[in-house]
Image (tube, helix red, strand yellow):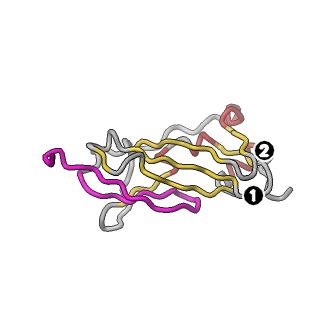
């Protein structure tokens, strides 16, 4: 089938094809960005089983964009080293049509850490909603 990702190279070339992401924050407010987490459900919206490349999807740095109140995308720490090609198969997960694969992302990926404020979070390279994450000022009780 045309939409089926059958080989690791297909998943690498377009790891998001056939998936739709839905984000929600783990809770409404976080004390620091060390605690901040966003849950993402990747749903297979195709009519065929697809392989999800978790070497990409499991990394918040590779999968998420975080924007400040002005809509400016914030730079993260450097991404992890790529998976060796001979190990890529270990990271491919099969997701059947209509099923979801869920990942909890930590927003502890900035240096310096995120300052208190409200941030927008969305996925990179895949259709998703945008959620707000509120990092509290430690001086506020």
Q: Position of residue 10 (x, y in %)?
A: 74, 50
Q: Residues within 10 Å of mark 1 (few under 14, many from 20)?
A: some
Q: Is residue 77 above or below residue 126?
A: above
- Residue displayed at 62% across by 58% down: 20
Report the mark closest to the observer, 2 or 1: 1
Magenta stretch: includes residue 139: yes
- Residue displayed at 43% across by 59% down: 131
Residue sitting nearer the eye, 26 or 55: 26
Q: Quadrant of residue 31?
A: top left
Instruction: Name the residue beneath numbered marker 2.
Output: 7
Instruction: Please state the extent of the stretch shown in magenta in the rendering.
Output: 116-141
Helix, strand or loop at mark 1: loop
Q: Is residue 69 above or below residue 63?
A: below
Instruction: Name the residue beneath numbered marker 1.
Output: 46
Residue 89 circle label: none
Q: Position of residue 88 (x, y in %)?
A: 68, 36
Q: Residues at badges 2 and 1 in contact (C-beta under 8 Å)?
A: no
Q: Position of residue 57 (x, y in %)?
A: 57, 45
Residue sitting nearer the eye, 6 or 94: 94
- Residue displayed at 46% across by 52% down: 24
Give the distance between the C-alpha atoms of the residues marked 2 and 1, in whole angstroms. Answer: 17 Å
Q: Is residue 69 above or below residue 109?
A: below
Magenta stretch: includes residue 131: yes
Give the side of residue 46 with respect to residue 117, left or right.
right
Q: Position of residue 96 (x, y in %)?
A: 75, 46
Hey, which residue is sitting farthest right in the picture?
1
């Amino acid at each position: 089938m045309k939409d089926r990702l059958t080989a690791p190279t297909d998943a690498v070339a377009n790891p998001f094809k056939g998936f739709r992401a839905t984000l929600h924050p783990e809770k409404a407010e976080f004390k620091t960005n060390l605690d901040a987490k966003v849950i993402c459900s990747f749903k297979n919206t195709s009519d065929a089983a697809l392989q999800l490349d978790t070497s990409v999807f499991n990394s918040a740095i590779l999968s998420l964009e975080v924007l400040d109140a002005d809509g400016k995308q914030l730079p993260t720490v450097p991404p992890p080293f790529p998976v060796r090609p001979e190990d890529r198969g270990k990271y491919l997960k099969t997701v059947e049509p209509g099923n979801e694969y869920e990942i909890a992302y930590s927003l502890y990926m900035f240096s310096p850490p995120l300052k208190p404020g409200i941030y927008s979070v969305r996925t990179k390279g895949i259709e998703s909603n945008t959620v707000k994450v509120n990092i509290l000022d430690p001086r506020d009780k």
